[in-house]
Image (cartoon, rainbow, N blue to C red):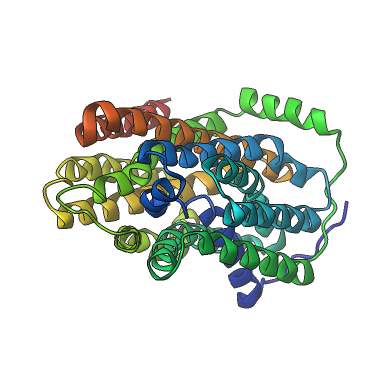
Amino acid sequence: MTNLRKQPLSNYLVLMMAIACGLCTGSNYYNQPLLSSIAHDFDVTMTVAAYSSVIAQTMFTIGLVLLVPLGDYFETKKTITGFMAIAALGQLICYLSWDIQVFFIGTAISSLFVVAAQILIPFSTILALPQQSAKVVGTLMSGLMMGILLARTAAGFISSIGEWHYVYLISGVLLLIFAMILQLKLPSHFPKKIQYFSIFHSMYVLIKTKPLLRQRSILGFLCFGTVSTVFTTMALLLSEQPYEYSDFQIGLVGLVGIAGIIIGPSIGKFFQKGKEQQLTHYSLILLILSWCVLYFAQVNLLIYVIGLIMIYIALTVLHITNQNVVYGIDPNSKSRLNAIYMGLYFSGAAIGSVIAIYLWNHFGWVGCCSYGMICAIACYVINKIAENK
């Protein structure tokens, strides 16, 4: 195992890592404002096109469970950059796709390997000084969330001035460029060698013996499950009456989530004061209130925007809090801890996307909001039970 000498990470390197995180995770969200164009181009319904979101979240979850633990097995830098290169290949397949099946295949490949970001984030805590770690994680998470937001807007803009296929060409090229940058700038790190399958046994042991890991993972599962309802139905809601928005307009609406991104790096100071539980409590209250507002989203765009801002802030605060708590459970198992937490986190997103499509088709926006509220209340109850133990 290579013992890295911890030193302050340069702002440049942190920025490059944050952008890489954004490019990786944003790749899963290009399709969301493009559903109408994809459906029209491939002559399928919007519901069929929307299953690309389900495939993306499902494959991402599989990657988290099966591939992220490799960050504790192979040389970390090569694992990150290699995964990014394969993800770029998937994006290029999406660019070249001639029917919905090929597009689904490209989406599956890309989404499986963009988990590189989930190896890079815990790796950053190994590189950074202890007093810098929380801020670095907050910055990388802000980059990740910014990638999700800008992915939608950029995809909508490119689609409006050209063809939606070019979104995936540009994304594939950018992933390759940043893979090369990280290959040059990141230090090599060889984790302690353990057998691959023993990694999964150790993950089981972590789940069994770490109640804090279980609690935070369940909160992440439910929280992102409820928020993915908004992500999945955004194009469905805004492309219909009374809005009837274009791809670009839908992408612009998604930008309101930048409010949640701005506060990301500043959250670190609360961890130094031991206020993780307070952050969790207030973020869950905000999550519940956001669904009260979103219930009226079909009435007025301003109401929808306010609800989006609230839910983005709630998700950002809770997620960064969860990750910092989880990473502190066992410093020697960060990739595995991250795989467990993020595996459940994106499982919630995948399941939430499927449920959102079903509820939209059968019960409309009211059904989606009811599901979101139930998940938000469940999060609050679970957290209160954990507090009282």
The reply to whether residue 155 is visible in this rendering is yes
Q: Nearer the viewer, residue 162 or 1?
A: 162
Q: Report the residue at 76% width, 42% height from top.
A: 70
**Quadrant in which residue 76 is drawn:** bottom right
In the image, residue 281 above or below residue 271: above
Please state which of residues 257 and 29 is positioned toward the viewer in this rendering. 29
Report x, y in % for residue 205: 69, 25
Residue 2 image point, x, y percent: 87, 56
Residue 179 lies, with reference to residue 275, above or below; the image says below
Q: Looking at the image, which residue is at 69% across and 44% down?
A: 335
Question: In this view of the protein, which residue sits in the foreground, 223 or 10?
Answer: 223
Asked whether residue 134 is in view, the answer is: no
> Relative to 202, is 97 on the left or the right?
left
| Of residues 372 and 110, the one drawn nearer to the viewer in this rendering | 110
Residue drawn at (22%, 43%), measured in percent from left and top? 289
- Percent across and percent down for residue 20 are 61, 63
Q: Is residue 362 left or right of residue 174?
A: left
Q: Is residue 305 left or right of residue 384?
A: left
Q: Specify the quadrant that holds the C terminus.
A: top left
